[in-house]
Amino acid sequence: MIRFEHVSRRYSADKVALSDVSFSVASGEMVLIGGHSGAGKTTLLKLIAAIEHPTSGAILVNGQNVGKLKRAAIPYLRRNLGLVFQDQKLLFDRNAFENVMLPLAIAGFPPKESGKRARAALDKVGLLAREKALPVALSGGEQQRLAIARAVVSRPSILLADEPTAHLDAENARDVAAIFHEFNQVGVTTLIATYEDSLFSPYASRRLTLDHGVLKA
């Protein structure tokens, strides 16, 4: 489902985010991506989503070389991806329901179906009762769960998360980890960049470790 073939990402001659990285992830796996701050974890996830492009090598997602996609094709790639990054990019002038509806509206889903999907996603993360609340009225843990609901509302086959439990207390972090496990249990391929292996390792199939952009054996 996801394959990196000798992928490097250089920002300049002396700033290398990833160097000759090769690995594959099978459909339905949950894979953790570990490593120190600046190891290249976020860059790796952004490459999968075509937010950034490799300097060399190939990245295949569902058979497509994402580094070669034309700009017009990238939104279609992302319809199969759920993205949860540290910068949640919630819309603070819209309530929880409207935040989750946004990806469906952009994708052109009919309003009636969009409403059902949005409420189902909110229910899955335990926020259905807060659907009319603005993000500012939600706790940090609830905001993170809202970001997850928005990421999965399109029912993606791949879920990418960058430090999804950062800045959460222990209880909320456990809840978020359990939510990712539930999605993975129903077949969603899941890649999580995290320092908190203990939260996710009971659910993960394996761990990839980056060290200054190099994938360690």
Image (cartoon, rainbow, N blue to C red):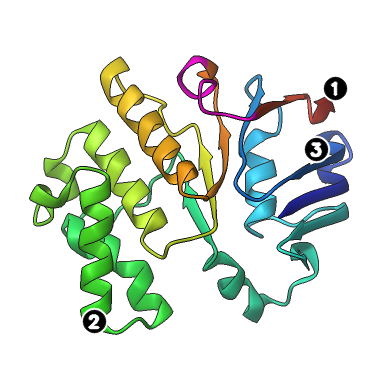
Element at label 2: helix
Element at label 3: strand
**Overall secondary structure of the magenta section:** loop
Q: Which mark is residue 217?
A: 1
Residue 131: quadrant of the picture: bottom left
Figure check: 172 above or below 90: above
Counting from the top left corner in percent of width and height, residue 128 is at 14, 51
Label 3: few (<14), some (14–19) or many (≥20) C-alpha neighbours in 10 Å: many
Residue 16: quadrant of the picture: top right
Q: Residue at x 26, y 32 (%)?
A: 141
Contact flag, marks 2 and 1 (Cβ < 8 Å): no
* 89 in magenta: no
Q: Which mark is residue 111?
A: 2
Task: Give the residue pinned by disc 3.
Answer: 18
Q: Residue at x 16, y 44 (%)?
A: 136
Pick whichever, 76 or 177, lies toward us.
177
Mark toward the start of the polypeptide (2 vs 3): 3
